[in-house]
Amino acid sequence: MRSLKISVASHVFVAKLEIERAPKTCAAFASLLPFRNQTIHSRWSGEAVWVPLGDYQFGVDFENHTRHPSRGDILLYPGGHSETELLFAYGSSSFASKMGALAGNHFLTIVEGREQLADMGNLVLWKGAQPILFEALD
């Protein structure tokens, strides 16, 4: 598997797994597919939505981690200073929490549907939590 389909409400994206750069994170996340949850708008990270995962442990350390995801990057924060979470950047973003700056593992990159990113982010910002579904494509 090299790609995932990600649906947020009526918005559909295709993302490439960053297997070469974040192999352990990709494998850990792929083992949970299909993965359903809710996404809410970030509070400290700028133009991004996030999926809070509480104390869930993926069993991975930092790999291919960044504080500054690009538009269309999806990060996994494996826990530590803040709760475990996914961060999905739809615009300008600097990953942070109430504890301060964070770095997350960049393990997915949107390759199709980028033109929908701003609309998806604004939907979550103005309409509240939305369902998110990650599914294997190939």
Image (tube, rainbow, N blue to C red):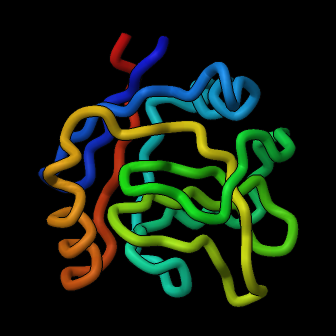
Residue at position x 37%, y 50% from top?
Answer: 72
Position in image of residue 75 (x %, y %) = 58, 51
**Residue 131: quadrant of the picture:** bottom left
- Foreground residue among 39 and 48: 48
Residue at position x 82%, y 39% from top?
Answer: 60
**Residue 134: quadrant of the picture:** top left
Describe residue 98's horizontal placement relative to residue 16 as left or right.
right
Position in image of residue 56 (x %, y %) = 74, 54
Describe residue 61's horizontal placement relative to residue 4 as left or right.
right
Describe residue 122's horizontal placement relative to residue 88 as left or right.
left
**Residue 100: quadrant of the picture:** bottom right
Describe residue 102's horizontal placement relative to residue 80 as left or right.
left
Position in image of residue 84 (x %, y %) = 71, 61
The tally of labels here is 0
Residue at position x 68%, y 47% from top?
Answer: 105
Residue at position x 37%, y 10% from top?
Answer: 138
Position in image of residue 87 (x %, y %) = 52, 60
Residue 73 vertical placement versus 69 (above, below) = above
